């Protein structure tokens, strides 16, 4: 891994809200005086009633509970909208950029958004939605997705957003799990020029698990089925609704939303977040990580169907009075300059995206980037996976022209907001490292087997030793699963599931999920390392590596390899790849099996589902578990049919 250091650019050190010494000072205070630190930080939120007790937390099984800002009352929607009306009512809140550049976009000011949200909140009420009810939202990246979420928050309903790329089965499972009686959708979605039959998917899902009401937003105008008595057009209902709606006073610990994790490690969990802590945590992290000041144009390219879209498209930017781009499309349509054309069109200053998109664009060559202007960019962000140093370098050098710091933010659906991340004016960057903890976050490494705390430079399982305001509060409907999943392995700590290395400078390097570490003849190695070696071979486009039982070595190495288009997957190439890895890493990393795979099983968020690859490698193919979140389930059949005989 690269250990090159990129110091904080001078102008950032001088002008950023948090410079290096401010970071040290505030971090220390957040740990030594949490009461004082959070009393100050919580002032960023307008409280209807001030909180009384900062936190009420126990990670012990007997009295397990997590609560923050106890006794406080607030409404997060009023914080995102109402309080801006006087100062920036006519400022754009959302600049919507459609799938195709020739389609007219939309700009909603804070006042527009407020009117739309209040109106839709009344639509929800008129359709029987009460405080505490769960509302399923299955919408594409249109402003109505944010409007629907904020309308729920306004009246205290709990939204469960389901990514609009999920199948009817996956949707049905999520509707059923949270017992929601209402689904909000659109006629069709549009991504990369392709229509997604959202309403038809809802109809199919509701055959398995019925709901009372479906509200349909007309987006493409495509024809859809309509069930009288159940289905309602958004525009019809809105035409009859008042644009005035008081915001409900919510308890700090009232649920705000449920979001099912992407499922790369098992049955999706209904991650539940509450109101007060989430509001403070997301808005604080957004302000510091992006050094955000109102007036700057900010663009987080994540879908609202993921937690990044919840925290850093909908809630935090609006609470902070931001002007943001919301993008319906994909990075490679109509061509692979699309991101950078959108940056130029709207003069985006802060851009936040996932490594999977960056790697895909990197493969297409630099010209698509360099022919665009991008002079408005000043800060770049990354989230979702470890960003490999090669992609980091490309992002920094080609996209950001060495001018823009990169904030590589490590966090999870479960953590609500960024936990380990550089701050652009404070942190010298090391490509591939998420660097240092956010205020109030106490990361630690434990020995995965013994559970003992590791000091200094070390590698182990990443845990967080105490609570932070944006921590999830439960797995919806299964509090015991919450405890068992995150708090039972290493008593007293929140277990992230990720492996991590801490270097001599105290920088954290996320190495991937702890399950992805294999132990070959007593040598522990991260699968990511073997994968990187394979991908460096000129004929390999992608690789996924898992462990397999091995009589002698304990665990052997099973590699799934996707070769470039037009490559013949021959026996010679297989042997060559085995030798290649031996040469790149050493004999200990020699793959025992190489299976050529035209496709790898991926979640819709683009992450490889190693759990399934592990089962195939272990020859345990009877029960592959939940595959409903796979982007293309057909890939699995192909892998099963083409297992090499070993
Ligand atoms: P599931 O929990 O259902 O298996 P998931 O973990 O992919 O799905 P998310 O909560 O969206 O769902 O992703 C969080 C995970 O993504 C982290 O635990 C980590 O493995 C990875 N991750 C996110 N950001 C980074 C980052 N900046 N660097 C390294 N890894 C990251
Ligand atoms: Mg996870």
Image (tube, rainbow, N blue to C red):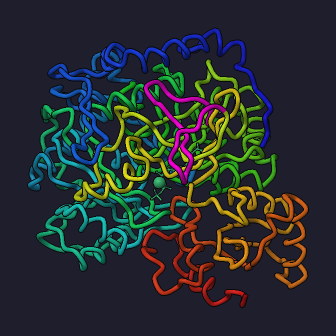
Please tell me which residue is depicted at 33% across the width and 48% down the height of the picture: 144
| Residue 401: x %, y % from top left | 77, 31
Please tell me which residue is depicted at 41% across the width and 57% down the height of the picture: 261
Q: Main secondary structure of the magenta part?
A: loop
Bounds of the magenta segment: 434-456
| Residue 421: x %, y % from top left | 57, 32
Which quarter of the figure is the N terminus placed in? top right
Tell me, yes or no, whether the highlighted magenta stretch contains residue 608.
Answer: no
| Residue 33: x %, y % from top left | 37, 15
Please tell me which residue is depicted at 23% across the width and 29% down the height of the picture: 78
The answer to which of 4 and 235 lies nearer the viewer is 4
Please tell me which residue is depicted at 20% across the width and 61% down the height of the picture: 180
In the image, residue 464 above or below residue 48: below
Q: Is residue 108 left or right of residue 148?
A: right
Q: Is residue 619 left or right of residue 596?
A: left
In the image, residue 235 above or below residue 373: below
In the image, residue 281 above or below residue 333: above
Q: Quadrant of residue 608?
A: bottom right
| Residue 214: x %, y % from top left | 21, 64
Q: Quadrant of residue 561?
A: bottom right
Q: Is residue 490 left or right of residue 147?
A: right
Which quarter of the figure is the C terminus placed in? bottom right
Specify whether residue 415 is in view.
Answer: yes
The answer to which of 240 and 350 lies nearer the viewer is 350
The answer to which of 433 and 130 lies nearer the viewer is 433
């Amino acid at each position: 891994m690269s250990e090159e250091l990129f110091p904080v650019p001078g102008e950032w050190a001088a002008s950023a809200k948090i410079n290096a010494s401010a970071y040290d000072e505030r971090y220390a205070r957040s740990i030594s005086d949490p009461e004082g630190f959070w009393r100050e930080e919580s002032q960023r939120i307008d409280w209807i009633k001030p909180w009384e007790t900062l936190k009420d937390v126990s990670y012990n099984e007997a009295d397990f509970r997590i609560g923050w800002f106890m006794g406080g009352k607030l409404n997060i929607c009023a914080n995102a909208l109402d309080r801006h009306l006087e100062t920036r009512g006519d400022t754009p809140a959302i600049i919507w950029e459609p799938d195709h550049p020739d389609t007219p976009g939309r700009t909603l000011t804070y006042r527009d958004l407020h009117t739309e949200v209040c109106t839709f909140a009344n639509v929800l009420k008129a359709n029987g939605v009460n405080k505490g009810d769960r509302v399923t939202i299955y919408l594409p990246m249109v402003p109505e997705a944010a409007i629907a979420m904020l309308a729920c928050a306004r009246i205290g309903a709990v939204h469960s957003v389901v990514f609009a790329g999920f199948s009817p089965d996956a949707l049905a499972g999520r509707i059923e799990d949270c017992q929601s009686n209402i689904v909000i959708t659109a006629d069709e979605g549009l991504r990369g020029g392709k229509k997604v039959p959202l309403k038809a998917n809802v109809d199919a899902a509701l055959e398995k698990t019925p709901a009372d009401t479906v509200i349909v937003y007309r987006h493409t105008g495509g024809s859809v089925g309509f069930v009288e008595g159940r289905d309602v057009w958004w525009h019809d209902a809105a035409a009859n609704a008042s644009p005035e709606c008081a915001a409900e006073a919510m308890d700090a610990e009232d649920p705000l939303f449920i979001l099912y994790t992407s499922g790369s490690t098992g049955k999706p969990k209904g991650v539940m977040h509450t109101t007060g802590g989430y509001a403070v945590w997301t808005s604080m992290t957004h302000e510091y990580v992006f050094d955000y000041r109102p007036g700057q144009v900010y663009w987080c390219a994540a879908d609202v169907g993921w937690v990044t879209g919840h925290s850093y498209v909908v809630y935090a930017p609006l609470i902070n009075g931001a002007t943001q781009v919301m993008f319906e499309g994909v990075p490679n349509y109509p061509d692979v300059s699309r991101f950078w054309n959108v940056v130029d069109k709207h003069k985006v200053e802060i851009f936040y995206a996932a490594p999977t998109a960056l790697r895909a664009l990197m493969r297409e060559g630099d010209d698509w980037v360099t022919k665009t202007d991008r002079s408005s960019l000043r800060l770049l962000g990354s989230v979702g996976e470890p960003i490999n140093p090669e992609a980091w370098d490309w992002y920094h050098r080609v996209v950001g022209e060495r001018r823009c710091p990169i904030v590589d933010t490590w966090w999870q659906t479960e953590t609500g907001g960024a936990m380990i991340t550089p701050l652009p004016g404070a942190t010298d960057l090391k490509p591939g490292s998420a660097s240092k903890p956010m205020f109030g976050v106490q990361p630690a490494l434990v020995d995965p087997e013994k559970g003992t705390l590791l000091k200094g430079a070390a590698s182990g399982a990443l845990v967080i030793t105490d609570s932070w305001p944006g921590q999830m509060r439960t797995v919806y409907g299964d509090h015991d699963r919450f405890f068992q999943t995150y708090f039972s392995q290493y008593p007293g700590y929140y277990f992230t599931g990720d492996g991590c290395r801490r270097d001599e400078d105290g920088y954290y390097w996320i190495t991937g999920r702890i399950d992805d570490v294999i132990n070959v003849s007593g040598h522990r190695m991260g699968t990511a390392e073997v994968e990187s070696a394979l991908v460096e071979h000129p004929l390999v486009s992608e690789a996924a590596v898992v462990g397999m039982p091995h009589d002698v070595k304990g665990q052997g190495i099973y590699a799934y390899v996707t070769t470039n288009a037009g490559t013949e997957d021959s026996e010679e190439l297989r042997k060559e790849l085995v030798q290649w890895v031996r040469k790149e890493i050493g004999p200990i990393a020699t793959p025992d099996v190489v299976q050529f795979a035209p496709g790898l099983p991926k979640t819709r968020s683009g992450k490889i589902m190693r759990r399934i690859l592990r089962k195939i490698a272990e020859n345990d193919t009877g029960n592959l578990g939940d595959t409903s979140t796979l982007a293309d389930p057909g890939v699995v059949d192909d892998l099963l049919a083409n297992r090499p005989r070993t």
